[in-house]
Amino acid sequence: MSTAEPASARSLGLAGCEACGLVVRLPAADGMDHCPRCGERLHSRRPASIERSWALAITALVLYIPANLLPVMTTNTPLGAVSDTIMQGVVELWSPTSWPLAIVVFVASVTIPLGKLIALAYLLLTVQRGSVQSNGQRVCLYRLLKFIGRWSMLDVFVDTFVVALIQLRPLMWVEPGAGVIFFAGVVVVTMLAVNSFDPRLIWDLPHQERHGHD
């Protein structure tokens, strides 16, 4: 015996304000209005959510390549300068005493950014294909992406701390490399891509139109 699909706010002509949370009815034919409490623009779905998320995700993927190929730190001594990429830093940290830190840096700097892009691509593809399976799991995945975004700057924080700590000119000093800028760009753009994705699209039925403002 099949059960009826629960009514959604979209089907009832309702929308929640993303600024103050007030739920109001949308009188406009195009599905847009303004919140009577705070004046925020209302829409049942974020305009061009999928397109913006794809554009930002692809940008983050492009930035991810130089972020891992370019040096993130340069150590200067009277004997010369040595530049290290993220992976070279992980290799140097790998020792009997500091291997846990090496794992943390590898996971935070390499695995998590790439994993976030793959997970976001999965969400976008399933939404575009109109998938109705594992909706709850996909919502949990979206919440996980939102949660771990704030911890993705670990490598940048480590480099900043080391650069500020080791300034013993003219014996030794550390300078940030170009890879840090690209890595920070990956983190920021990925967070913007996740924030641009509208999780309400996950619950839309395949027969419903997926216009950005519907």
Image (cartoon, grey):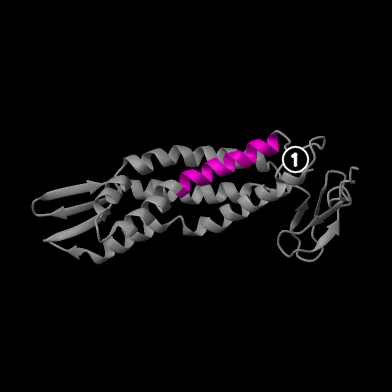
Q: Is residue 152 magenta?
A: no
Q: Position of residue 44 (x, y in %)?
A: 78, 49
Report the residue that reaches farthest toward the front: 1
Q: Is the stretch drawn in magenta largely helix, strand or loop?
A: helix
Q: Quadrant of the C terminus?
A: top right
> How many numbered callouts?
1
Q: Is residue 79 left or right of residue 166?
A: left
Q: Amino acid at mark 1?
A: Val
Q: Is residue 120 magenta?
A: yes
Residue 15 picture quarter = bottom right
In this view, the residue in front, 196 or 87, is 87
Q: Residue at x 71, y 46 (%)?
A: 135
Q: Position of residue 150 (x, y in %)?
A: 50, 59
For mark 1, what is the residue?
132
Q: Residue at x 61, y 50 (%)?
A: 141
Q: Is residue 168 above or below residue 75?
A: below
Q: Residue at x 49, y 51 (%)?
A: 188
Q: Position of residue 100 (x, y in %)?
A: 34, 59
Q: Position of residue 191 (x, y in %)?
A: 54, 51
Give the magenta part as a residue range.
Answer: 112-128
Q: Quadrant of the N terminus?
A: top right
In this view, the residue in front, 205 or 136, is 136
